[in-house]
Amino acid sequence: QATASLSQHSLTLEWRRSEFDLSVLGSELFKFGYRMRSTPSAPGSGPRISPLALRCLLTLVFTGNVALLAAYEQFAAANLGEGEALLSLLGLICLCFTLLLGAAPIFLSSYRAIQIRRWHSDWIPMTMIVTTAGIVAFHCAFSGWPLNVGCLILATLVCVLIAARWLGALISKRS
């Protein structure tokens, strides 16, 4: 869609992605002595998923993967033998991705607060994650818990914390 205004000396273009080549239009306009000046559209003009919502969604996906692996290990794969080690390794990899995606903003803000010696509210979730990781590691090592169950507990905690942060940001943005 194109609109031209000769009185205001402007040309307004709107197009769908991959259906229009702006560089060809720019070179054609330059041939006739026109210059292109672009003004970006407003950031809220179109629907867009926030980075925190995407982080929450990916954390939920990897937590779901850990849950499926833990359920498969507990109920369907009772006599896998060496397959249990592979399932535990896959669960641990999913937990690592969950921690990298979900716990990173919590740990980064806490780390920055520690550097400047200030109190930050993310110290509470960080302490919860570290304490839960220690308790789960102890029970997996000494009490005979399957590794995927421990990974599921920790991944669920991280998923709940990042979902709470996303919901808090969404509510504060709406008000």
Image (cartoon, rainbow, N blue to C red):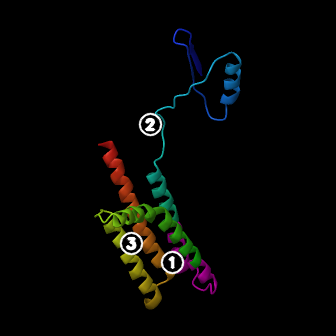
Q: Are marks 1 and 2 in contact (CB under 8 Å)?
A: no
Label 1, label 2: how far apart the Cα atoms are = 41 Å
Which is closer to the viewer, label 1 or label 2?
A: 2
Q: Indicate the quadrant containing the C terminus: top left, top right, bottom left or bottom right.
A: top left
Q: Which residue was labeled with disc 3? A: 129
Marks 2/3 in contact by CB < 8 Å: the verdict is no
- Which numbered disc flags the more N-terminal residue, 2 or 3? 2
Give the quarter of the figure containing the N terminus: top right
The residue drawn where x is 41% and y is 66% is 107
- Image position, residue 73 (x, y; %): 55, 79
The image position of residue 94, as x and y in percent, is 54, 69
> Closer to the camera, 162 or 147?
162
Label 1 sits on residue: 148
Q: Residues within 10 Å of mark 3 (few under 14, many from 20)?
A: many
Who's the residue at 45% across and 78% down the image?
150
The image quarter in which residue 5 lies? top right
Name the dominant secondary structure of the magenta segment: helix
Question: Which secondary structure lies at badge 1?
Answer: helix
Which of the two labelled residues, at mark 1 and mark 3, occupies the earlier sequence position? 3
Give how far across and how far down residue 36 sits, in percent: 60, 24
Please provide the residue range marked out in magenta.
64-88
Q: In the shown orientation, is residue 150 left or right of residue 122?
A: right
Q: Nearer the viewer, mark 1 or mark 3?
A: 3
The reply to whether the C-beta atoms of the residues labelled 1 and 3 are less than 8 Å apart is: no
The circle drawn on residue 44 is: 2
Residue 65 falls inside the magenta stretch: yes
Q: CA distance from mark 2 to mark 3?
A: 34 Å
In the foreground, 10 or 164 = 10
Q: Going by the image, does 154 lie left or right of 62?
A: left
